[in-house]
Amino acid sequence: MSRRLTKRHLTPVDEYQCPLSPETQAIAEEQLRETENARSQALEALRNWLEQHPKFMAIRMDSNFLLRFLRTKKFSVPMVQEAIERYILLRQSWGIAFNQLDYKLPVMMELIDLGYIFVSPFKDKLGRRVVIYRPGVFDPYKYTNQDMCRVMGICYETLMEDEECQVRGVVHYADGAGVSFPHLTLFTPKEAVRIVKNGEKTIPMRHKEIYGVNVHPTVKFALDFGMALISEKIRKRVKLYTAVEDVEIDKSLLPSEYGGTMPMKEMIELWKVELASKRDILLLNDKMAVRLEMYSEAAREGAISALRAGANTCAGADAVGDAMRGLTGNFRKLEVD
């Protein structure tokens, strides 16, 4: 039986019905070059490519999943192809940290209840969600780096299922109080580099603003290290403060403990309701798969340059390489309203 016939569609090809508000659609067109015509052409091109690509074994084909990549990459089909392949490869090869994103797991519930990471129920004036981090509550002697990756993955994947969030992006607010040197030993330098670089290039999220407060001098060098790894575009969006009251963010978006009106515990309970609504689709994502034997060891470990080289080599060597390039080339020539 051919590889094409054995490929599993975890979700069906749907006829897209845009759920976005008119205001959000205008933002998508202005900032992301998204129109009805561009969207339908890009979805068709991507689905044809996924169907023919020999490395994919099981994949989601629904519009919501594909659009998060298209929106992040501003409808550049070649960039989206690379991003989707990298995303599924890393989920699979680093599965111990990025699979089984189940908020009901006891350790995940502990970290969520502690307020390690959660999302405010309020949106800012630009309609964006605010992710709140409190890494100081993470006990590095009790929890593992896998626990950290998994609970953050639960948060991000839940947000990525929201199309308004895909378009408008997210705001990050981090309180570094309580973070100390032991937290930095959770990851090796190599792991840290791979996570930071893939976090920006692989996870299809639009990071619009990043606020940090209470960064202890003993971990400042680690922050400087991380800042050097991210793109200049994202680096310019990072703002650091020494006091909570100085942070230039609408305090009403934050828990009452940070100057808002709603207690943190109440925010966390509301966030759990959102997590419950997306739990099944997050667990379905575990079934997405590529053929690991077709990738180099470096690519499986998350080396972006190795994966890019591997993808290009595959496209040039396998029987469907010309077909994939043809799809991309044809898409580039299409008229877009």
Image (spheres, rainbow, N blue to C red):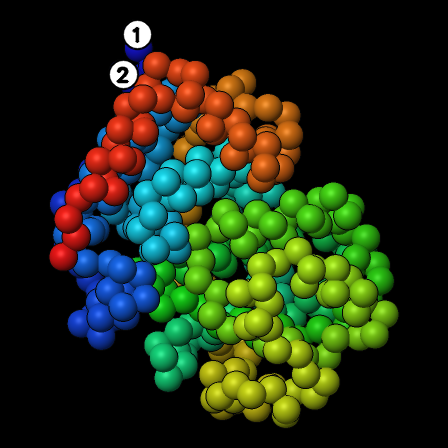
Mark 2 is surrounded, within 10 Å at the Cα level, by few (under 14), some (14 to 19) or many (20 or more) other residues, namely few
| Residue 208, percent from left and from top | 47, 70
Q: Are marks 1 and 2 in contact (CB under 8 Å)?
A: yes
Classify 212 as above or below 190: below
Which residue carries the number 1 mark?
A: 1
Disc 1 is placed on an element classified as loop
Amino acid type of the residue that numbered disc 1 sits on in the rendered structure: Met
Mark 1 is surrounded, within 10 Å at the Cα level, by few (under 14), some (14 to 19) or many (20 or more) other residues, namely few
Q: In which quadrant of the rendered image does the C terminus lie?
A: bottom left
Q: Residue at left 59%, top 24%?
A: 296
Q: Residue at left 18%, top 72%?
A: 22
In the image, taking residue 274 as reference, residue 309 lies left or right, namely right
Q: Is residue 276 visible?
A: no
Q: Is residue 163 visible?
A: yes
Q: Dividing the picture into quarters, in which one does residue 137 lie?
A: bottom right
Question: Of all residues shown, which one is farthest toward the top?
Answer: 1
| Residue 205, percent from left and from top | 44, 58
Which residue carries the number 2 mark?
A: 5
Classify 304 as above or below 113: above
Disc 2 is placed on an element classified as helix
Classify 44 as above or below 128: above
